[in-house]
Amino acid sequence: MGRLAALAACAAAMILASPQPDGTPVIAGDALFTKPVGGLERTASRSEIIDVSGMPFTKALRVVIGRDAPDTNVTQLTIPNVAAVQRGDVMLASFSIRGRMASGKDPAQVMFLFERAASPWTKSASLGASAPNQAGKWRTVHVPFRAAESYAPGEAMVSLRFAFGPQTVEIGGLDVRNYGKSRTLDEVIAMASAQSPIGTVAIRLMPTRKAQTMVGLGGNFCQPRYGQTEPMDAVGQWNLEHLNVAHARVGIPLNWWTPEPGIYKDEAQAHAGFLLMQELSKRRIPIVGSVWEGPEWMLGGQREQMGRTLPADKYDICIEAIAKYLVTARDTYGVTVEHFSFNEADIGVNFRFSSAQIAEFIRRAGPRFRDLGLKTKFLVGDTANGMATVGYCRPLLTDKTLSPYLGPVAFHCWDALWVPEKQYAAIAELGREFGKPVWCLEAGHDAQLWRLPSPWESWENALRTALAYERTIRLTGATIMDYWTYQNNYPLVSPDGKTPYPVFHVMAQMERVFARGSTVIGVSTDHEDIRALATIGPKPGQAAVLIVNPAGPGKAMVRGLRAGKPAHVEVSTAQTQRRSSTSQVGADGAMNVVVPARSVVSVVQSD
């Protein structure tokens, strides 16, 4: 995983209702109108202050974006903190948004961040927010979070990013409050969400609108890559025993495998990597092998240094080292590694290749793999984020000399909760254009979550993981989602493998909805905050729905289920996970489902 590769999402960010008046203001009250928007000229944009009526605020900032940009921060407003913030302080940001994309069809978008004002730009909060679907209406957005670091005045900033393509977006009522330690984060979230009930939401399954067929949910197994000499830790063992692992991505410890040119050692970390793959293979779990780190004699620089480029005159010796590892896995351990990649080569974690450079590498490696009888194909991309995937992968897919050696399009979804929908949808279009499956091989919502204190056992981690999975599967057409990781790195259970965290229970729920062989179908919902995704199959009569609610309490009327048949319902919240019940679907194929505040609900009909 490239920990600095993606914008981090906050430990707790959600769209809520009314703001809370107490707390200490963190930014100047007029900062929205006194700080200049940066980068306007780079997107042919302009900004102005407008009058507003019918809202708690009387003025708003209007930003008109004229053209696309390579990144959302090309045009942004940054506002420094004027009050000190201590690490762990509970905070609440609020703003209202309205506007439309230039096409007039879609709502405008903005991204809110609270981050360090200098490198490494540590994020305490980030949230992508959209205007209401109804033109001219305002939507109030709240972002509860906990400060990741301590900041003196001016050491942190609010960032509002606007470069989501041609659009007109208006922002008003911007406020950031610090509650310090006087309230817990859960208290602030619960208080706000209780004031934003969703009412009754209509959810309809549309089985004639079929999308991808799922391979299923899997995970990364990478501890030997990080230096462990045991193949499987307690976390990984728990997941293998309690989840239906449909796919695995394994780290190939190339740096320990070949410590000197032409020397290969099946020892320690390299041996652990082989044993790990052997265990997965015995369980009939398909394997991707990925390289993060290379030996210093090959890659140069310092260990774990990002962005290092492999010299072209070392391509062949690198290819030979990888091939020898794959052949040893096959001949000594009975393991077939179906696909190979360099992890996040687009940004260099830690091998960096341009599209042209990786094309040349594959052009040499493919024939060598074939000569050795290896059936391993190269993933197309395995990029750090979805936003970069199409631009990086298209040159490879259009190069016909590479076609025999290429497998699925692959990417990581660390940007899932804020990237413009059209950019994730473009990944699905790319896969269809070239007849390639799409795989998300690092599934998660925050590449910097590890910087926050004890985030793994939090409900927010579980809720936001579900939001990231729903958005990624729905938009990109991904058939595989490999969680980062099924071992003790972003863990699903306690390090001793005995206490499952809330995110484990959500993973188990999603695993049933997106089971191997199920087909994703269309779903409609009449509430813009409620996320729903459904599947049918693999057997006749089977159907499942995932409902993710980041807002307040309510219920859903789910239509399109199998009439007169029972449905199993599981509900997970911050208080309890996988509370289960069974209900009978009505003769009209509809059933009422209670949807608590900030919950993940799954409805499953078996045959």
Image (cartoon, grey):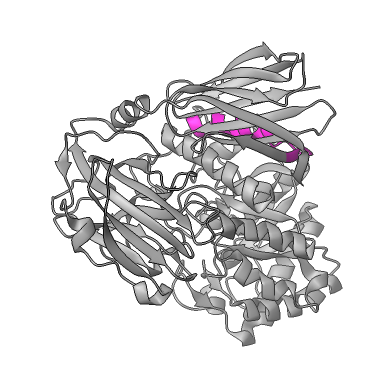
Above or below: residue 148 compared with residue 379? above
Residue 515 counted in the magenta span: yes
Magenta-highlighted residues: 502-520
From the viewer's perspective, is 247 left or right of 417?
Answer: right
Above or below: residue 312 compared with residue 332? below
Task: Report the magenta stretch's main SS.
Answer: helix
Q: Quadrant of residue 289?
A: bottom right
Residue lying at 21% horizontally and 64% vertically, measured from the top left: 35
The answer to whether any part of residue 83 appears in the image is yes
Residue lying at 39% horizontally and 54% vertically, measured from the top left: 111
From the viewer's perspective, is 472 left or right of 193?
Answer: right
Rendering coords of residue 314 (x, y %): 63, 83
The answer to whether any part of residue 80 appears in the image is no
Above or below: residue 21 compared with residue 78? above
Q: Quadrant of residue 155?
A: bottom left
From the viewer's perspective, is 243 left or right of 39?
Answer: right
> Which residue, as the protein is rendered here, is positioned at the far bottom?
313
Rendering coords of residue 209 (x, y %): 76, 42
Rendering coords of residue 76 (x, y %): 34, 64
Residue lying at 32% horizontally and 52% vertically, measured from the top left: 171
Q: Nearer the viewer, residue 222 or 9?
A: 9
Residue 217 counted in the magenta span: no
Residue lying at 59% horizontally and 27% vertically, measured from the top left: 202
Quadrant location, the C terminus: top right
From the viewer's perspective, is 223 left or right of 63?
Answer: right
Count of numbered marks: 0
Q: Nearer the viewer, residue 397 or 487?
A: 397
